[in-house]
Image (cartoon, rainbow, N blue to C red):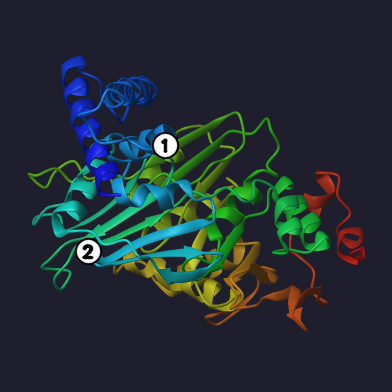
C-alpha cells in the first residue's frame, strides 16, 4: 500500500509540472488535463515494469486519484462524485460530515488546516469571490452548480467552517415530485395549473427542506413563450425554459464599493421586460420591491424560511418593514393580501424525505393586521389531502383553460 501511494504521489508531481509547462487551467481544461494524466500514468506504468520504481496498482484508480488532487477537490472529491451525497460540511479538519437522504453522518476523512484553506481557495478561484478578514463570509457557486458557504475565524471560533450544498438533480418537474412521494398527483395538477394561470406563489420551509427544488419544478409549469427573470444571492435556480435571464448579487470590492444587493436586482428585473420574476429567497427589505412588482401585475414566485404557510404570510408582512421607517404595516399587510395568491409549505421529514405539508390560498382579505388564508391541501394521517378551501383569482384559471372545481375534486389514483 505504501509503495502504491508513493507511486501515485510521484506521478502527481510529474503531472503538476506538465500542467505548469503546458499552461493548462485544470478548472477550465478538464478534458485536456484528464488526457495528460492518463498519458502520465501509462508512461509511469510502463517504466515501472523495468524495475526501479514502485508499482502503481490499478491505472484507473490512479488516474481518478490524481485527477481528484490536480483538477478536483482532493479528499472531498469522492463525496462530489457520490450521487447519494446531498451536502458536505467541515466543522474542523478532523470533522468532515456528509448528508445522504437527508441524514447526516461523520466521514472518516481527515484533513489538515492548510488543506481546508487550499480547497476553499480552489473552489473560489472560478467564482471571482473571496474570503478574508475584511470579508469573513462568502457565498459562491461551484462549476458543477453546488453552493459553497464559508465562515472563517474570528467569526468562527477556531476553524474554517465550510458548507457545500450539492446540486443533486432529483426533480425537474412536478411529476418528478409525485414520483418521489413529495407531492400527490392532485396537488401537483393544481399547482401546475396555478403557475400556468399566472398566480403568485410563495414557497416556504426550513433549511434543506427542498424549497429551491420545488421552485424549479413549479417554474417548469410556466408557459414556454414567457420571459423569466431570476434574482438570487448566488446562482442556484435551474429554470428549464428557453427565455431566462439570470442575475446574482455581487460582493463589495476590497475598497467596500461595487456591491450589488438582491434589492437592486429585483428593481432592475422590472426593466428587463419580464413575464415572470422569480426571487431565489427573500430575507429582508428586497421583499418590499418584490411585493411592489407583484402588485404591478408581473407574476412571480419566491422562497422564504418559515415553519408553516401561516408563518410565511406573517413573515412577508414584516420583512418589508426593514426597508425603512416610512414603510408601515398599513401599506404592507393589504399589499401582501393582494399580491400573494398561493403558499406552499415543504418540510424535511424525519425519514429524510422532503414532503409538501400544506398548500393554502390567500383570498385577498385582511382584518386588521391578520390576513385571511384558505386551506387547499393539508396533511392528515401522514398524507397530503384536499381541504375545503378554494384559491383566489378563479378567473385567471378560466382564462388559461382550467376548471378549478375539477382540479380540486379529482381523486388521486
- Decide if residue 128 is on the left or right side of residue 352: left
Q: CA distance from mark 2 to mark 1?
A: 29 Å
Query: Badge 2 local density, few (<14 within 10 Å), some, or many (20+)?
Result: some
Q: Is residue 235 left or right of residue 101?
A: left
Q: Position of residue 164 (x, y in %)?
A: 37, 55
- Which residue lies under the disc numbered 1? 58
Asked if residue 194 lies left or right of residue 237, the reply is right
* Element carrying mark 2: loop
Q: Nearer the viewer, residue 334 or 155?
A: 155
Q: Taking 50 as reference, is 318 above or below it?
A: below
Residue 121 location, x and y as percent?
A: 20, 45
* Residue pictured at 36% horizontal, 26% vertical: 30
Q: What residue sits 37% from the left and 44% below the top?
A: 265
374 or 413: nearer the eye?
A: 413
Q: Observer-nearest residue: 112 or 45? A: 45
Which residue is disc 2 drawn over?
93
Q: Secondary structure at mark 1?
A: loop
- Tell me if residue 268 can be seen: no
Amino acid at each position: 500500500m505504501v509503495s502504491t501511494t508513493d507511486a501515485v504521489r510521484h506521478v502527481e508531481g510529474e503531472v503538476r509540472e506538465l500542467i505548469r509547462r503546458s499552461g493548462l487551467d485544470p478548472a477550465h481544461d478538464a478534458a485536456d488535463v484528464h488526457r495528460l494524466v492518463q498519458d502520465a500514468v501509462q508512461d509511469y506504468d510502463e517504466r515501472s515494469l523495468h524495475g526501479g520504481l514502485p508499482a502503481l496498482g490499478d491505472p484507473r484508480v490512479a488516474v481518478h486519484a490524481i485527477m481528484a488532487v490536480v483538477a478536483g477537490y482532493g479528499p472531498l472529491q469522492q463525496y462530489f462524485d457520490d450521487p447519494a451525497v446531498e451536502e458536505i460540511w467541515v466543522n474542523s479538519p478532523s470533522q468532515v460530515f456528509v448528508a445522504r437522504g437527508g441524514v447526516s453522518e461523520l466521514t472518516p476523512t481527515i484533513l489538515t488546516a492548510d488543506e481546508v484553506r487550499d480547497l476553499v481557495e480552489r473552489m473560489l478561484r472560478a467564482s471571482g469571490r473571496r474570503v478574508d478578514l475584511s470579508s469573513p463570509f462568502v457565498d459562491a457557486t461551484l462549476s458543477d452548480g453546488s453552493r459553497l458557504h464559508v465562515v472563517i475565524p474570528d467569526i468562527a471560533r477556531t476553524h474554517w467552517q465550510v458548507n457545500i450544498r450539492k446540486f443533486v438533480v432529483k426533480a425537474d418537474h412536478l411529476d418528478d415530485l409525485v414520483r418521489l412521494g413529495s407531492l400527490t398527483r392532485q396537488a401537483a395538477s393544481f399547482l401546475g395549473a396555478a403557475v400556468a394561470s399566472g398566480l403568485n406563489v410563495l414557497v416556504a420551509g426550513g433549511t434543506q427542506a427542498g424549497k429551491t427544488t420545488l421552485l424549479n419544478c413549479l417554474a417548469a409549469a410556466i408557459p414556454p413563450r414567457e420571459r423569466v427573470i431570476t434574482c438570487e444571492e448566488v446562482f442556484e435556480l435551474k429554470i428549464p425554459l428557453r427565455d431566462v435571464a439570470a442575475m446574482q448579487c455581487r460582493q463589495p470590492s476590497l475598497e467596500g464599493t461595487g456591491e450589488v444587493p438582491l434589492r437592486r436586482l429585483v428593481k432592475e428585473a422590472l426593466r428587463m421586460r419580464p413575464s415572470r420574476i422569480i426571487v431565489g429567497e427573500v430575507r429582508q427589505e428586497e421583499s418590499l420591491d418584490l411585493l411592489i412588482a407583484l402588485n404591478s401585475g408581473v407574476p412571480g414566485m419566491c422562497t422564504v424560511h418559515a415553519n408553516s404557510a401561516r408563518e410565511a404570510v406573517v413573515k412577508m408582512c414584516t420583512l418589508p418593514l426593514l426597508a425603512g421607517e416610512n414603510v408601515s404595516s398599513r401599506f404592507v399587510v393589504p399589499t401582501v393580501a393582494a399580491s400573494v395568491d398561493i403558499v406552499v409549505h415543504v418540510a424535511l421529514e424525519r425519514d429524510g424525505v422532503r414532503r409538501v405539508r400544506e398548500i393554502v390560498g390567500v383570498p385577498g382579505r385582511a382584518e386588521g393586521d391578520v390576513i385571511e388564508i384558505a386551506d387547499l391541501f393539508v396533511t392528515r394521517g401522514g398524507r397530503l389531502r384536499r381541504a375545503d378551501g378554494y384559491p383566489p383569482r378563479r378567473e385567471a384559471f378560466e382564462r388559461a383553460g382550467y376548471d378549478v372545481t375539477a382540479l380540486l375534486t379529482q381523486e388521486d389514483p
